[in-house]
Image (spheres, rainbow, N blue to C red):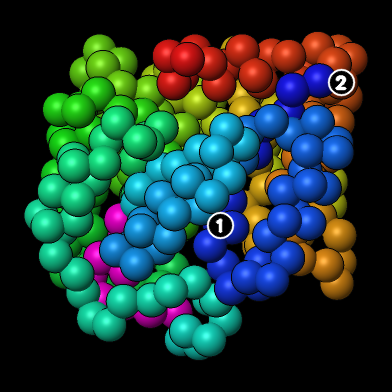
Amino acid sequence: MKLLDMHCHLTHDYYNDKMDDVIAAAKDVGVVKVVVSGVNPPTNREVLKLQEKYPGIIGATLGLYPTDLIGIKPEDPGESGLSVTRGEFDLDSELKFILENKDKILGIGEIGMDFHWSKEASEHDLQEENFRKIIRFAISIKKPIIIHSRKAEVRVLDVLEEEIKNNEIQVIHHCFSGKKKLVTRAAQLGHNLTVPAIVKKLNQFEYLIDLVPIGQLLSETDAPWLSPTPGEKNEPKNVVYSIAAIAKIKGISEKEAAGKVWENFERIFDL
Ligand SMILES: [Zn+2]
């Protein structure tokens, strides 16, 4: 089986002294690709370094996290563990950095909108403006995008539908937590959706597997967050739980589920 972790943050400081073990444990269960996403200028640079250090298994996407971009931090930045930026950062210069590195990356993400940490209407408008600009940039360099949406699912889908007319670029929703109607809408728009390993204990992702055609599903962990095992930090090896859930709900073997997910990955990234 070739397993995929479509989305995680191995640049988190939790992995600093355990990276070799984490990569080895992932390989042991059959993981052949771990896509690490940046969220801001410092993490984007770290992602590229990590990819150089572990060639083959690590894939990179460079991101512009919606709240980082406008200078908003979660109340306890200490909980992040990711390199942070002080205040807002310049969108144009980071897009320039991405452009310069476009041949080294799989896609752009994570990007999107987050109304959980940002409550003001004016901030939401600014997030939307940035999001549209990034989508247009992604279309211009023909790269898939990896979307984060939190409490902003309807607006995110509206923007994606308006900006991407003929599936010019592939869209991946990571940990999409919209209601059933929105899951179906995303799937009908031709978007791809990930199944996080936490599906093992959070059944909201079971209806996602049920509603989305097998040809649009991917597996991810969002490590170190969203651990399927209480008391443990998440790791790429846990994508086995995503595959098990897909197999169970779609009524196919785990081997078939893993094969389908891998096929989807190759299609989306034109590999
Ligand atoms: Zn993430």
Left or right: 115 in relation to 33: left
Label 1: state its secondary structure. Answer: loop
Looking at the image, residue 9 lies above or below residue 144: below
Distance of label 2 from label 1 (alpha carbons): 25 Å
The disc at residue 9 is 1
Number of numbered markers: 2
Q: Is residue 153 left or right of residue 55?
A: left
Query: Mark 1 packing: few (<14 Cα in 10 Å), some, or many (20+)?
Result: many
Q: Is mark 1 within 8 Å of ligand 1?
A: yes
Disc 2 designates what residue?
A: 254
Of tags 2 and 1, which is closer to the observer?
1
Q: Mark yes or no: residue 203 visible.
A: no
Tag shown at residue 194: none
Q: What's the magenta bit mostly, secondary-structure-wise?
A: loop
Taking depth in this image into account, of 41 and 214 the one nearest to the observer is 41
Residue bounds of the magenta highlight: 64-74
Quarter-wise, where is residue 109 in the image?
top left
Q: Is residue 228 magenta?
A: no
